[in-house]
Amino acid sequence: MTQQPTPSALVSTFAPGGALRASINLGNPILAHRDPASGEPAGVSVDLAREFGRRLGVPVELLAFERAALSVDAVRAERADIGFFAVDPARGEGLRFTAPYVLIEGSYLVPERAPVAENGQVDREGTRISV
């Protein structure tokens, strides 16, 4: 039987300074953005950080970054204790990922006359994709 960590062990692991410093990536507005009225970070990532802090019994300090790379760098440099990122082996070097908390599906937007109707039809010679 695996022994569960004690609350104090969790706090010392995830919030060693007494507050949970959460790196928030504002680069994906579906997960985090600035509230237009207050200018404060808001969204799923912010809600998760606050709930994690609540469960640990510590205050949460939000560190907002405009790009994922900056947000990841904050965790890697230990300026933040946790972050919320897409799983990316290159980005995650030296970090650990949990199981995903959200799956985001992407799709192609094409004109009606386009010969592409399914993802498998995109990977063909002569097909151009713009991002």
Image (tube, helix red, strand yellow):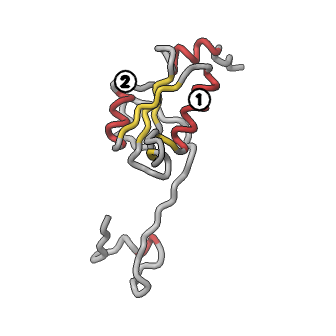
89 to 118, vertically: above or below: above
CA gap, disc 2 and disc 1: 18 Å
Q: Residues within 10 Å of mark 1 (few under 14, many from 20)?
A: some
Q: Residues within 10 Å of mark 2 (few under 14, many from 20)?
A: some
Report the residue that reaches farthest toward the right: 1
Mark drawn on residue 131: none
Residue visible at 57% across and 19% down?
A: 58
The quadrant in which the N terminus is found is top right
* In-front residue for pair 39/48: 39
For label 1, the SS is helix
For label 2, the SS is loop
For disc 2, the marked residue is 79
Cβ–Cβ below 8 Å for labels 2 and 1? Answer: no
Q: Position of residue 108 (x, y in %)?
A: 43, 70
The answer to which image quadrant residue 128 occupies is bottom left
For disc 1, the marked residue is 52
Q: Position of residue 103 (x, y in %)?
A: 54, 52
- Which amino acid type is shown beneath numbered disc 1? Phe
